[in-house]
Amino acid sequence: MRSPVYVALDTPDLARAKALATRVRHHVGGIKLGLEFFSAHGQAGVHAMAELGLPIFLDLKLHDIPNTVAKAVQALGALEPAILTVHASGGRAMLEDAKAAAPTGTKVIAVTMLTSLDASDLTATGIVGSAHDQVSRLTELAREAGVDGIVCSGAEVAAAKKIWPKGFFVVPGVRLPDGVVGDQKRVVTPRQALDAGASIIVVGRPITQAEDPDTAARAIGATL
Ligand SMILES: O=c1ccn([C@@H]2O[C@H](COP(=O)(O)O)[C@@H](O)[C@H]2O)c(=O)[nH]1
């Protein structure tokens, strides 16, 4: 069975991304390419990474008016990513149009509340309620809009799964108990995320910044 761990290759260096992916390929289920990589290398870079044969999660977190997002999704279609992210807060029409514009095999996943935010960040942006309330609200919206699932932290995934039992749940902000948290605020361990209902977990720096990335990836896999 394929590992539920997707490694986030957050680097603008194509050679480094390829080298990292090659080292950890037997311990992960796929690779996640985000804004840092895509801004540096665009579609050509994604094609180059796809040659490694692992599923590609294109984490661009699209967020704009429905027409613009739909056209962007269409333009990305040739890449046929396994997973593509948009922001749930873009609204129902944007989510519906993103899903309609995506290739059949691509899961369109809505980011609810970034794992780098906590309750005080919500308040500062004028959002009423807890992280749990916000994720629940946006999970319901994503379900109604017909996308395939959501991104949330491991602290909310069980509640989100109750709202949407058939949803696909992506959980970043994952750390081993003694791990460096960095800019993440809502963090759980890989095991906790999966036990709570994550479909896949995203792990970046704990693997990519490790002295020995394959040992780090293997160590995370051993806890699952
Ligand atoms: O809410 C979110 C959505 C996406 N991410 C992305 O996941 C990885 C996490 O990297 P770490 O180094 O393991 O912290 C990164 O690419 C983010 O862009 C997220 O962290 N939270």
Image (spheres, helix red, strand yellow):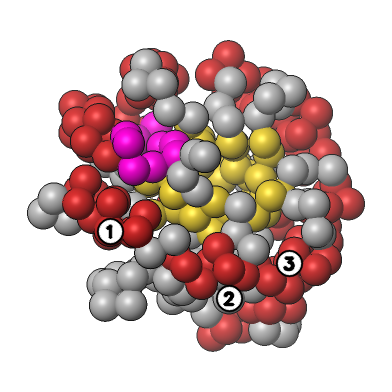
Q: Point out the residue furthest to the right here.
A: 144
Residue picked out by circle 2: 155
Q: Nearer the viewer, residue 172 or 130?
A: 172
Instruction: Identify the residue at horizontal 52%, vertical 39% (top origin).
Output: 1
Taking 41 as reference, is 87 above or below it?
below
Q: Amino acid at mark 1?
A: Ala
Q: Which mark is residue 160?
A: 3
The foreground one among 27 and 145 is 27
Residue 25 appearing in the image? yes
Identify residue type, mark 3: Ala
Report the Cα–Cα distance between label 2 and label 3.
10 Å
Circles 2 and 3: CB atoms closer than 8 Å: no
Magenta part of the protein: which range?
A: 25-38
**Residue at horizontal 23 percent and vertical 55 percent from the top:** 216
**Label disc, if present, on residue 219 of the rendered structure:** 1
**Element type at mark 2:** loop
